[in-house]
Structure formats: structure tokens, C-alpha cells
Amino acid sequence: MSDPTTTQLPKDLAAENGMVNVQIDGHWIQVPRGTRMIEACKIAEKEIPHYCYHSKLSSPGNCRMCLVQMGMPPRPAPGAEPEYNDDGYQEIGWMPRPVISCANTVAENMGIRTSGELVEKCREGVMEFLLINHPLDCPICDQAGECSLQEFSVGYGKGQSRFKEDKIKKPKNVKIGPRIRLDDERCIMCSRCIRFMDEVADEPVLGFSERGTHTTVGIFPGKELDNNYGLNTVDLCPVGALTSNDFRFQMRTWFLKETDSIDTHCGTGANITIWTRGNKIFRITPRQNDEVNSCWMPDSHRLNYICPTDEDRLTACLIKADGVHEETCWESALEAASEALKQFDASEIAIIASGSQTNEELFMMLTLATELGSEHLSIVARDQASDNMLISSDGNANSTGAKLIFQNSAPSSQLANILEGVRNGSIKAVIAASENLLEAAGFSNEDLEALELLISINSQANATAQASDIVFPGAAPAEKRGSMVNITGRLQRLNAACIPPGDARSDWEIIRDLILSISGEVAQEAPQSIDALSKILASSIPEFEGKHLTAISDLGDIVAETGHSIPLLKREAERKANGEIVG
Amino acid sequence: MDPFLILIISTLVKIIGFTFMLTLPMVAYAVYAERRVSAIIQDRVGPNRTGIPLTLFGFKKDLHFAGLLQPLADGLKFFLKEEHTPSHVRKFFFWIAPVLTIVPALLTLCVIPFGSSVTVFGEQIKLVIADIDAGPLFIFAIASLSVYGITFAGWASNNKYSFFGGVRSCAQMISYEIALGLSIIPVLMVFGQLNLSDIVQYQADHGWLLLPLWGDGLSTERILLLIPLVISFVVFTISIFAETNRMPFDLPECETELVGGYHTEYSAMKFALFFMGEYAAMIVGSALIVTLFFGGWSIGFGADAAVAEMAFGGLIHLGVFLAKVIAFIIFFIWVRWTLPRFRYDQLMKLGWVVFFELALVNVFLTAGIMMLIN
Amino acid sequence: MATIKVTRPKLSLLEKLYFPSIVKGMFVTFKHAVRSLRGKSIGGDSLNTSGLGVTMQYPEQKWDDHLPEYYRGVPTLVTDEQDRERCVSCQLCEFICPPKAIAIIPGEIDSDDPWAKVEKRPKEFDIDMTRCIYCGMCEEVCPEQAIFLRKDYAMTGLTRADMVNDKKRLYEIGGVRTGLVNKWNDIK
């Protein structure tokens, strides 16, 4: 190409950016060199049905569902130059046999056909084979409604079976772990679960046995699937072979409403989807966010949700009179709280916030401390051992947020002073929000009894609520809207999937009303909604500039440099670099 | 006994007896009859169940009485309903309107002769509340007051449908009152007087106006007079239909256009008063037709004098009168469930162009015939 | 659209007078009244007249024998000849139900149950008959032939709670239905 008058060919233009030209269903697009064909089709917005392929796992190519027709330019005869048409592309020679798109990478001038008689016939055949031993369990199968087998049968299947022989019987309803049930008849041998346990969870306990149509997924003898990431295999399973005991037969998926939110059990802030019907949470599943939790989340976090219908939920304000709690309305509870607080000197009041509160709530806690003039404001540190996967060493979901809002690199540093003050009597009143003081905070029952006034916000009836003089019913994480910053400094959004039960409210509303009750200001001047509050927050904290709730992107935005990273993501990046996975 | 005392007592007894013990139950049962007759005409059953609910007290069967207690249940329902006055109405007129429809209808009863006379304590007591010499005029005067009730109701309801209903009713009643008044003039010319008791007595002696079959009724003059009198009767009867706002002249409350017409906003007893007013007007209308054209309480065929001789012969006459009135009420109902509603312009045309002229010409025709006879 | 001119029919003087047609109409209604009173209304026989008009007197007379096979009465659950609850609580009826009359809480079958292999059955199954519109969609959508609209139609109750048919009542009304597909017998 020494002649400058000759225009550059498309392949050279693409090559400059490390791209290749691919023709997908007649349209030429550029995709990065080394892309899998299935990913190239995804870029071209062509759906390729698939079962075994998963971008975070290796590609064994055993389901055969992603077959497409491929074509390459014919090799020129020795000495001949390749011929280019007017657009600068070579003629494509189509192969007579299909290829699987999940395990092949694209090449320059490649052609892919995702439809056409060959591809459609192949898919019909694959579907028919997959279904010959599949039981007609759909009415009792939890996967129904989100089952790839159902979807692709409708989309690409034949509609009927020519299989007249008896179906092969396999074990059904096998308990393979404390949380998981296996139905082998439903299994289509995609091996996603096997690969996940092997590659991601790093505890290979699943495998195939037998051969041919008798192939069965099973647990290794003497083992059980009790890994803390085991339930991810249930999410991965494209059919209903693996089902979660927790969600088993609870509700059909088509009734459930999906709400995107984040996990509040540790500093990672895994992205989740909360599945609700009415005001009841039925399950929580991970939501893909490659910067936070990839596609996974730990079982301990997903099963440990607080639902509005739980029996131990607080649903009304309580005031203790003669040692017995009595239900009361918000007005009288707030008035009682502000009157009681006015009896104390500012230095005698301590405010204990929670690292699991949202930024907005922490901001209100800070405002409350300013209003009262108290210098004793602290969150409760929750250090724990990281599992070197997704569970971080910080048990608080929002310590980073507390650091930014309190403008204090150690927001929990005051806690020791408060505890000391309570014990020596210099602190007589404590306001505790969303924290059970008897747990991580290190308070003892005697400490709580020594207090003259304990006001607490609790979503559940716990020991702190029991000891409190005034209890405000708070909202659980699934009932809150707000933002949090995870350990890597990523600002993420929580969305409310349910409404708080009874009289319960979000902490920010309670603290706002308490501040208004103490100061006697007009209610209209306080923020009326969480969005209004988040705008005030965004303009008050420099790191949150412009990042009010609706401005946060769905996968979060980095607002601070913390130096932390998530171990599982690091390993995933390595495997991607090695070419083991697509990523 | 003091004749004056007897007059007072007998008048009170007549007022209570004729108005509250006779006419008001008749109103209630006219509603029942309306429902049963319409059902029978339409191959249905109608209310046949309301009776004594014995099963509630543990008996095997209820007593139905063919649904004869239905009016009681209806009344009870009206009493127990919420007495609701909408906030947007003119309260005074809204409340007075139902009264203004029922009261004139009942007031007109006082000149209707219900029977000849009975003899109590040696005093002959006529079975008419007020035996005045201007019967028909009194009735027209009072009856035309009821248009106020309907107009007030329509206007005070502050509602376009009610208002239209009120306006239509007002126009309709005024239009047909003219024909009504003119159509009766030939009758009065024949009788030569305005006292209803005497008119009936005249018919008892000389043959009913439309059925002059005895006494001197069979004379050529009377038969010749029948021509204008039949015209009178037709115009009068149809005008009575229009006056009482009944099918086919129920434009003021025609449901398809005006929801409920002037009583759209009314409920409970206030609505019941309108309802009773309509049926009371129908009864009075029937009574008037019977009195003027069909001999009132007279049995006819010269039997009246003999009956009147008996001490309580007046009660027999009362029965005869009621039988005739009931027959006419059933005729009213029959017409209602047979004919469709007029269009409003047809109604007006019929009133002003046909009946008004017809009644006017009829007066001259009667006068001519009477001149000819004399 | 083409304009069609309709000429009013020319009426003769007699017709203009209304009277003949009014009288005719009065005769028609009179004829009906007489027939009605004699219990000989047209069509009365085939409609099982009670003797007045064509009306049937409800609680004393009933139409039950004439109800067609496809009659849509009260929706019920059925058991089959093997005494198995046919419903597996797939909740498709709950999903399809236009007035949202059906509420199901699914549950697992105990492992010691003879039909444990079916795995799932309703723990609670309520049909709110104050909401039900008898459309029959639940019967149509049921993949297990478990819900049927029976010929019962007289659902009454003194409270709203009375009008909610729970699982027990549904099986009571539904009874046993034979001749259905028994696909679960093949499951091991």
C-alpha cells in the first residue's frame, strides 16, 4: 500500500484499532480482534440462544444450541492476489456445516448467519434432543417463567416431539446441600454449575457421571454443596435442575416484581435484584456489575434479608412507661424525645449512627449532632475476616460514605470515648440509629441500664429496642431509597422494593422530624423527600458534587479513592487476561 | 245533638277517612297495581313475595299474600333511607317542592263526592268533604298549584336535568290546562251548574252523561248531545293524562333524556312525596272523570233512589264510586304500559294545535246543539 | 358514504289520528294480560312457567336439569379416582384470573405422603366468590385438569369471609372427577 492515492481497505482501517470486520446477517460491523462470535452477535444485537455459554465461565461448547453458519473468504490460488469488491471486502464462502458461536473467535472478513434454514433446522434439532428426556414438570418447577428451555422451545423449537420411547428416569428431588435441591431429569448437561464450583467458587464438588443419554450431574461422593457461593449455581442453571430450598415453591416468578438495589451486609455492596410480591420479599439474586460483584453474591448475604412481613418487625413508636413499652403515635413520640433530650446538656448526649445507614441518613445524623451541639457522634466499626472472594473485611456497608460525610477518616473513633463516657457517667443520653448496641458496639446490658435516656431507631425488636426509653420503628434496607459508598469508593443506589410495615419510616425521615421537633422550625423548610435531601447532600459534600440520587448511574460511580479492591474481581481479571473466560 | 257539633265531627271524620284512610292507601296500592299489571301485560309475575317472613321465626313457610305487603315494605324503605339534601341546592325551595306537589293533589279531594249521604243521629251527612258550588273550578285552581312544586323542584335542584324536567313539566301543564278547562265547558253547559254533588245527583236521576240509558237519558236531545260530550270526554281524559305526567306524556321525567327529571336529586321521603303526588293526582283525575262523565257514585238504572233510602246506602254508593275509580286507575296503568312516549314537539303540537281548537269548537258545537234542542 | 333519502310513509287520515293504532296496541297488551293470567303465555311451557307469565319461580322451581355440560358455575378443585389432589399449585389460574379472585399459597408435599413424587400442592387455595366472574379462564388454563367450573351457581353468604371458598370447601364442592389424564403416575 505504498500508493497514497489508493484508499485504505476496511481491513486495514479496522486493524489500526485492533478491530476486525465481521458480516453478521448481511451487515458489516467492526468488533475487537479475539471476540467470540456469540459476543460479536450480541454487539450486533442478534440473539443467539445458548445454555452452556456464560461469559464469566470457560466455554466447553457442549449444549450445541448456539450454532450459527460461518463463512470465510476463499484462500486465493498460489500467486493470486485476494479480490476485493467495491466496498473493499472479499467474497465470503459459506461453510456447509454450522459452528458453535460460543467457542470460536471472529476473524477478518468473517461472515456469520444467525438465521436461515440451516441454522433454524439445527436449533430445532438441538431443542428436540434436549427435550426428549426432559420431564413435563413445568407446573411444579420453580424455574418456569424464567426457564431458558421454555423460552427457546417457544422461540426456536419444533413445537412437538417425535420421541415415542420411554423417557429415562433419573434421581429427582435430591438434597445436594443444605440450601440446594437437584432434579436430574430436568438437567440438560450444560455443566455451568460444575464449572462455577470449579472455576469461581474453587470448591469442585459437582461432576458428570454415566455416559450418553444416561449422563447425570451429581455431587462427589461424601461431599455436599455447602459452599457459601453455592446458590449462584441455582441462578446459573438455565433450567430447573438446581433449585434453592429458600425459594422452593414459594412463588411463581411471574408474580414477582424486580427492584434493583444493593446488598448492605458488607462493604462490597454487591448489586442485587430484590424480588417481591405485594410487600413480601421472596428472594434476592445478584445483579451483574463487573466492577463490584461480577455476577455473583454470597449465600449468607442473599438469604439474610429483613422482610416487612417478618414477625419481629417494629410497626409503631414505643415509649417506655414504668418499664413497659406502650405504643404511641409519631407526634407524641417525637415530642417526648425532644422534651427528654432538652433535659440534658449537649456534652451529655451521644449519637451512635450506623455504618449500614445510607449517605442521606448519615447526613441527617450529622445534622442532628450539630443541632444538639453534641460532639459525640460515631458509627460502629464492624471488622471481620474477608473470605477473599466477595465478602469484604468491613462489615459495614457504608463506612466509606461515613468517612466522606463526617469528613473524618475514622468515623468510628469516637465510639470508645462514648462507651467510656457512659461508664463514667459523663454521657447520660444516647441516640442510637439502626444499631444493636449490644453487638458490635460493645455495650453491655449494665451500660444501657446506666443511661438516663436511650432513644433508638430499630427495624426489629432487638435487645437495644427492649432497653430503649423511646423506640422509633425504622425501615429495613429493602425498604429504603438512598445511596451508599462501597469499600472501593463506588457510590451506588439503593431502591425501595417494599414499603415499611405499619408506622415504620426511613431513618432520615425520623431524624428530620426529631430535628424539627427539637428546633421548633417550620416543617416545610426541611427536605420533604429523599430526593430533595440527596440534592442537599450532593451540594454539601464535595465528593458527591452532582451525584444526587437520580444522577447516580445504574452501576454506580467512583467518588473516592480508597485503595481497596475486591479479591474475586482480581482473579476474574487474571482469568480473562489468560483467555480462560470472555469476562 | 248539636247539629253544629255533628257538622264539625262529621267533617273531621270525612277528612281523615277520605284522605288518609282511603286515598293514601289507594296511592300505595296503585303503585302495587302498577307493578303487577305491568308484569302481567309483559308476561311476568311482578312483586308476589313480600309478606310475613315466618321463616325468620322458625316456621316452614313464609306467608306471601301475593305480595300484598309490598307497599308497606316500600314505605318502610322510604322512611329508613337517608334524608339527603345535596349541598348545591336551594334548600328552602328544595324542601317545599315535594310538599307543593302532594298537598294540592290531596286538597282537590275535598270537593269530590265519594257517595250520596248517610244518616247519623238523624242528621243527613253528605259523603263529600266540602259541598261547594264551584267544584270543578276549585279543582282546576288547586291542581294547577302542583306545577309550582315541580317547577321549584327542577329549579332548586340546581341541576340541568332537573331543570329541564321542571321546565318541560311547567310548559306541559300550562298547555294542557287550557284544553282541560275548555273541554269541560260543554259538560257544565249540559248540567247547568258547578256543584259536583248535584251533578252526580243529576246523573243518577237522568242517566250518566256518557251512558244515558235510563230516565230521560234516552231522549233524542241527549243522544244528539253525546257527540260533543264524547269529544269532551276524549279531550278531558287525555288532558288528565298530560296533567298527571303519566305515559305517554311523562316528558318531565323521561329517563332516557333527563335521568330522573325534576326529582333526580331527591331521595327518601322527599322523593316518596313526589311519587305519591303523581299517583294521588291520578286518583283525583280518575275520580273527576268518573264524577263528570260516568255518574260518580251512581249505580244507575234508577236504583239510586232506593239505595239512598237506606240509612247507610251512601256507603254502597261509596263502594260503587271506588269501583269506578279503580277501573279508571287500571285503565291509566294499561295505557302507560302500552303506549310509547311522545316527542316533546308532538306533545306541544297536540296540545296547542289539536286539543285547544277541538275543545274550543266543541263549546260552540254544544251551544249550537243545545240551542237546536231548546 | 352515499346519502340515502328516506321518505316518510304517507299516512292516511285514520293513521294520522293515532287512535286506531292506539286501540290496536291496547288490544295487544290486553291479549298478553289475558294469556298471562291464564298461564298460557307464549313460550311459557318450554320455559317451565310457574303459571303467571313465562317466569319461573326461583327457589321453588330450578333449571338445574336443563343446565348444559359446559355450564360455568362455581369454580372448584377436584380429586381423581386415585384420591389425589390434582392441583399442584402452579398458580397459572391465579395469574390468568381477570378479577384476581384466586389466591394460592403453594406448599411442598411431605416426603411420607404417597404422592410425595408430585412434590407440590397448594397449602392454601382461596377463591373469592365476591370477585369471581365465572369466566372459566382458570379451568381453561389449568395444565393439571384440577380446576373445574361446576353447575352450582347459588353461592351465598352473610359476610365477605363466607364468600371466600377455601381449599377444603373447594374440594368438597368439586368432588371426584374421573377419566382425567394421570401423567404423574409415570413419574418414578
Image (cartoon, rainbow, N blue to C red):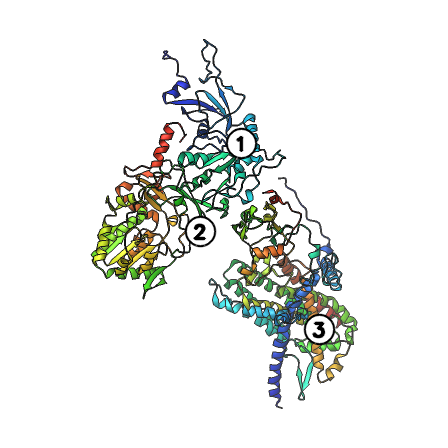
Instruction: Judge if badges 3 and 1 mark residues of a common chain.
Output: no
Instruction: Judge if badges 2 and 1 mark residues of a common chain.
Output: yes
Which amino acid type corresponds to the residue marked 1 in the rendered image?
Arg
- Residue A312 vertical placement versus A93 (above, below): below
Q: Who's the residue at 26% across and 51% down the image?
A: A367
Give me the C-alpha separation between circle 2 and circle 1: 47 Å
Q: Which residue is mark 1?
A: A211
Q: In this rendering, does residue C160 appear at all?
A: no
- In the image, B203 versus A355, the foreground residue is A355
Name the chain letter of the residue that bears numbered label 2.
A
In the displayed orientation, state which residue is furthest to the top.
A79
Q: Residues within 10 Å of mark 3 (few under 14, many from 20)?
A: few
Q: Secondary structure at mark 2?
A: loop
- In the image, C140 versus A552, the foreground residue is C140
Q: Percent from the top left, x then y, of residue B154?
A: 53, 62
Work out which quarter of the rendered image holds the N terminus of chain A and state it: top left
Comparing marks 2 and 3, which lies closer to the viewer? 2
Q: Earlier in the sequence, mark 2 or mark 1?
A: 1
In the displayed orientation, state which residue is furthest to the bottom.
B1
Q: Is residue A386 left or right of residue B285?
A: left
Q: Which residue is mark 2?
A: A279
Which amino acid type corresponds to the residue marked 2 in the rendered image?
Asn
Q: Secondary structure at mark 3?
A: helix
Instruction: Judge if badges 2 and 3 mark residues of a common chain.
Output: no
- Residue A273 vertical placement versus B57 (above, below): above
- In the image, A384 versus A462, the foreground residue is A384
Q: Is residue A361 left or right of residue B130?
A: left
Q: Which residue is mark 3?
A: B323
